[in-house]
Amino acid sequence: MSEYTFDLGRALVLGELETALSAIEPNSVDALIDAVEAADQVFFVGVGRVLLSLESIAKRWAHLGIRTHIVGEITEPAITGNDVLIVGSGSGSTLFPAAIAQKAHDIGAKVIHIGSSPVSPVGEVSSLMVRIPVRTKHYLADEIDSAQPMTSLFEQSLLLLGDIVAKMIIERRGLDMKALWRYHANLE
């Protein structure tokens, strides 16, 4: 039986997250917030566990009064040149997000890539990249390694980045935290 304990796992994950989040360029996060605040609507696209993180971010930002949408949802409206598409993809080469990024770019929307690989098909059509330089399926030389399975560190870092951005927007706008509940689902 393994001697690997919860305390060891917790310390490992939190240490890796501290390293990953500390490696994000703060100016890129400020530029992300500027773009989100200037947009009429913010769309998100990703697949797998990345999509789950993006859905959480979209929900939290909606609580701030931002009009957010997940690509492919039944109520998704049209994207326009006044909107932003945030593409979550560590490698930037995942087929579905890359194709959606290209289409949004062709329509005139601002495409923002949150990922790890600085050179990718998504990067070619993005006006901004927020780089979380952690291990991807490409195992690039400058990626932060992880002892966690596959791309867990990217998905975790993405989720926390979204919550950090939410707090930054709250502070920028001087929002009353109690007043945010008016945007929370109430059919529960």
Image: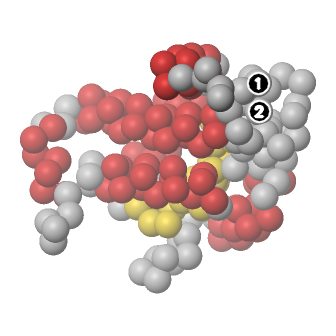
Residue 1 place in picture, x, y as percent: 65, 29
Q: Residue furthest front?
A: 1
Q: Quadrant of the C terminus?
A: bottom left
Question: Of residues 156 and 163, which is closer to you in this image?
Answer: 156
Identity of the residue drawn at 48% across and 19% down: 7
Q: Residue furthest bottom?
A: 74
Q: Residue furthest left?
A: 178
Question: Of residues 84 and 150, which is closer to you in this image?
Answer: 150
Residue 137 place in picture, x, y as percent: 83, 43
Q: How is the rendered protein coloured?
A: secondary structure
Quick one: label 2, few (<14), some, or many (20+) residues within 10 Å?
A: many
Residue 78 place in picture, x, y as percent: 51, 77
Against 35, residue 52 (above or below) is below
The tally of labels here is: 2
| Residue type highlighted by circle 1 | Asp
| Residue 11 in view in this figure | yes
| Residue type highlighted by circle 2 | Arg
Pointer 1 with pointer 2, Cβ within 8 A:
yes
Identity of the residue drawn at 13% across and 37% down: 176
Which of the labelled discs sits on residue 168, or is there none? none
Identity of the residue drawn at 40% across and 46% down: 37
- SS state under label 2: loop
Q: CA distance from mark 1 to mark 2?
A: 5 Å
- Which comes before the other along the chain, label 1 or label 2? 2
Against 40, residue 166 (above or below) is above
Which of the labelled discs sits on residue 135, or is there none? 2
Where on the picture, by quarter, is residue 25?
A: top right
Residue 6 place in picture, x, y as percent: 49, 25
- SS state under label 1: loop
Quickly name the residue at label 1. 145
| Residue 110 in view in this figure | no
Question: Of residues 124 and 6, which is closer to you in this image?
Answer: 6
